Amino acid sequence: MWKRDEAVRPPQPASSPSPGVGPESSTTRVDLSRSSERDIVNIGKSVVIKGELSGSEDLTIEGQVEGKIELRQNVLTIGPNARIKAQVFAKTVVVQGEVHGNVTASERVEIRDSGSVDGDLSAPRVAISDGAHFRGSIDMQRQGQVAKPDMPKAGEARSTAAASPTVSVAAASGSSSAPVR
């Protein structure tokens, strides 16, 4: 019976009568915007990169990287099998594997429960899950804020009572330390 229905169905026109009209064109337009909106690249478990890694797409790393990673306008996810020995610069960094090196993010750094970071974090928002490993320091300056010099000028007093951003840290059972100033 399905062959008979196919024979009865009128043939589809080769082109739409007017562009942007009809269910086919609107569906196509939506699908194209979704796919071009979020390009995500994966680096597999067996891949080893030594050197500089940069790009303009969201990236998930499952393999090994040694050197420098720059994705300043994108999200970097370090998967549970990843082993990173690099300086990391991204918009958002999510750590599920191991990172040895400093991590700088313009928006957020998140260390999940399986994640490990040995290095300094610099981001306006930092989240460290219960069970995560972290050893280093945290700098949470807000975007656009100019770093104050460490030493006050002659005749100036330096105040430490200024409002500072908070760190979201869920304490692990004695294994991680997160010095926060």
Image (cartoon, grey):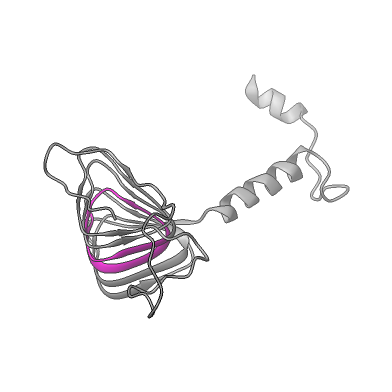
Residue 134, relative to residue 168: is it above or below? below
Residue 148, x across and y down, in percent: 41, 71
- Which residue is outermost to the bottom? 154
Decide: is 31 above or below 58.
Answer: above
User: Horizontally, is 55 left or right of 69 in the view?
Assistant: right
The number of callouts visible is 0
In which image quadrant can residue 102 be found? bottom left
The structure residue drawn at horizontal position 64% and vertical position 23%, both measured from the top left corner, is 2
Q: Quadrant of the C terminus?
A: bottom left
Q: Is residue 177 magenta?
A: no
Q: Residue at x 60, y 48 (%)?
A: 34
Q: Name the spot of residue 179 as percent of width and height, x first.
A: 22, 53
Task: Confirm whether the magenta stretch covers residue 99.
Answer: yes
77 over 51 or under it: above or below: above
| Frontmost residue, 174 versus 149 | 149
Instruction: Give the dominant element type of the magenta stretch: helix, strand or loop.
Output: strand
The residue segment tinted magenta is 82-105
| Image height of 170 relative to 89, above or below | above
Instruction: Residue at 33% x, 73% y: name it.
Output: 150
The x, y position of residue 107, in whole percent, is: 46, 56
Q: Quadrant of the N terminus?
A: top right
Res. 101 image quadrant: bottom left
Pick the front one: 60 or 47: 60
